Amino acid sequence: MSGYTEKGNVSLLQQALKVNKKPFPWVKAFLAGLAAGLPVIIGILFGELEYGLLTGMGGFTYLYVFNIPYAQRAKKLFFVVIGITLSSFLGTIAAPFPLAVAIIMGIIAAMATFVFGALRFTGPSAIFFVLVFAMTSGMPTEPELAFQRAGFVFLGGALSWVIAMAGWFVNPFGPETDVVKRAYNELIILIKSIGTEQFDEQRYKVMSSLNEVEDILIAGYLPLRRQKRYDRLYVLNDHLNRIFLEVIKNFLNEKTAPPQKLIEQLQVLSNSVDKSRLDIIEIEEDEVRGWHAKYKQLYAIIKRLDWDTEDISSHVKEEIEISKPTVRKALLHSFDKNSIVLLSAMRIGIMTIIAGIIAYQFHFERSFWVPLSCVAVMSGATVVATYHRAIQRGIGTIVGILIASFILSFHPTGLVIAILIFLLTFITELFIVKNYGLAAIFFTPNALMMAETVTPGDFAFTYFAQARIIDVFIGSIIGLLGVLIIGRSSASSRLPHLISKTIRSQAQLMFTMFSNHTKDGHVSERELSKLKTNIQGLKTVYNTAAGEIPIDRSALTYYWPVVFWLEQITYFLEKTAEEKEQQVKLSDEALAQLLYSYESLANAAYREHAPANLSFPKMQGLSNLKNDMIHLQRSLQMHEEKHPS
């Protein structure tokens, strides 16, 4: 969840043109250029430029590469290759039928958006599936070539897959190692913030990092091919969670600053995460004896990690118990009426079909650029992001079209085209992390050059530039209208229901954990999964609501701490449930009091009114959990400030 902050008087234009400070991804950019340009060069060597360009379309697969575990990357890119190949096949088959092209384009956009949203995949979502479909549908109408064209696109995608997986031979657990090390560094900042006003904010950052680590490790888990490096990261993550739980249990109200040696101990440990051996500093007993008791206990937990990779087998269970969420469950859950993912997919699908029908009905030259622009604009995660995309795409595309028109006016051929595709793809990937508009300046001529080269016809600079600019403008307007007309306030209207649902899910889990009438307080994976799904859905909807227009600032200010404390409680319940030695039990009276108070909070959240002062029972060993519940109650009681009378 991203915290809600005031934007003041910063305009949409200023926000859209802002260039962030992320470093340039030089290696990824080079490999992306290689994936797009190499197939064209191979085609030229065989005297078949058109086939090389078709194969180069499969190179778009590499644009879906992100820093995720290779086990997950292999599967994700495999399905991207299949999706892009199928898109090229359908584009060739549907080409003679404009209405079918518009409908299929909308279906592809909706399906890709839904799958990427439901599975929480990072990446460009539907845009390149739609682009490949659009480009093949704009080629000379020859349905009998569908398998041939799809075959070449598949070969380009397969080459991208190989390039993307090459890093596995050098550092097979690089993504997992990076995220674990980053989480340790966040933990160090948290411990430094003990006794300061930054403690609550930083503990949220650590918790977010830990959730990311867990997701990455689960995604990279291969039960049939265990390696010591993975086991080592698993134990490091487990240790990290134990330290964090110790901090939030005992240091919420601590005012004493942590000893410097303790910070140094953790820093050395963090620096050795990606090394073959973990380093532990030995601190003199006399020095430790003078520390506060809480810090002594924390140091004892840190020191338990005193092994190296050669001795890992004695510290890891014979079978690491990791339960991977199934794709089927994730997709089915997103078919809920309150799913923002489903709404977004339906919206982009409907508007793409409308854009396609308009383009073909008015007989635009290269009609597919209208719905394609609509998809590109609507790919923004929120209404604000959609406005940003429209502005960025508008400016970037106009400049890009002028560049493309200039390049095409020279009628480039052969090796020149291959080099241009490599360079334009390389520069696009460099700038996509900086600003979408900058990337559009270079991606637009790349796509136009590929499309126009494989589609024979006369070229006129002025006519071409004017036509493409009009196409992009109309497509962008249709995309903006779609976002404004269909469910523009759908996210904020769902927040009360999802908050209530998450609160009740937490209550169900607490009943199982703390009741004397459940066997050993055992929590099923189904119960944990339900709570995780609810909190993830709530965070997604909140972040979407933060980008709506008009934006209800008072509502977002009110809901931010509510979602914050719900996520804190969820994290603690999850980790406590996973501890096999967890034996905290509540009397029937205390549990009844807890459940009554929680149901009162859920009811107040659903009805959007401030709850009365509630009494939470004493929970020995879980004082921090009670403290978070009180904070949740106080956050919900701020309702009067949200809606002053």
Image (spheres, rainbow, N blue to C red):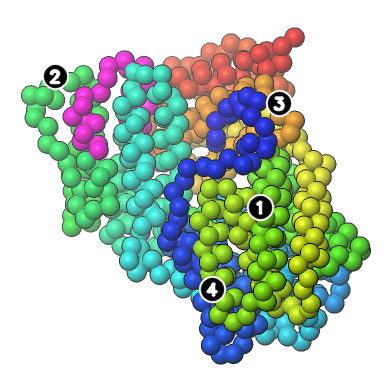
Q: Counting residues from the N terminus, which is met first, the one under dot 3 or under dot 4?
A: 4
**Which residue reaches farthest bottom?**
46
Q: Which residue is drawn at 35% across and 29% down?
A: 190
Q: Are marks 3 and 1 in contact (CB under 8 Å)?
A: no
Which of the 4 image quadrants contains residue 205? Answer: top left
**Residue at image mark 1:** 396
Q: Which amino acid does label 1 sit on?
A: Gly
Q: Are marks 4 and 2 in contact (CB under 8 Å)?
A: no
Q: What residue type is labelled 4?
A: Ile
Q: Is residue 480 visible?
A: yes
Q: Distance between the residues labelled 1 and 2?
A: 62 Å
Q: What residue type is labelled 2?
A: Gly
Q: How far apart are marks 3 and 1 (CA)?
A: 30 Å
**Residue at image mark 4:** 419
**Residue at image mark 2:** 290
Residue 249 sits inside the magenta stretch = yes
Where residue 552 is drawn, which disc sits there?
A: 3
Disc 1 secondary structure class: helix
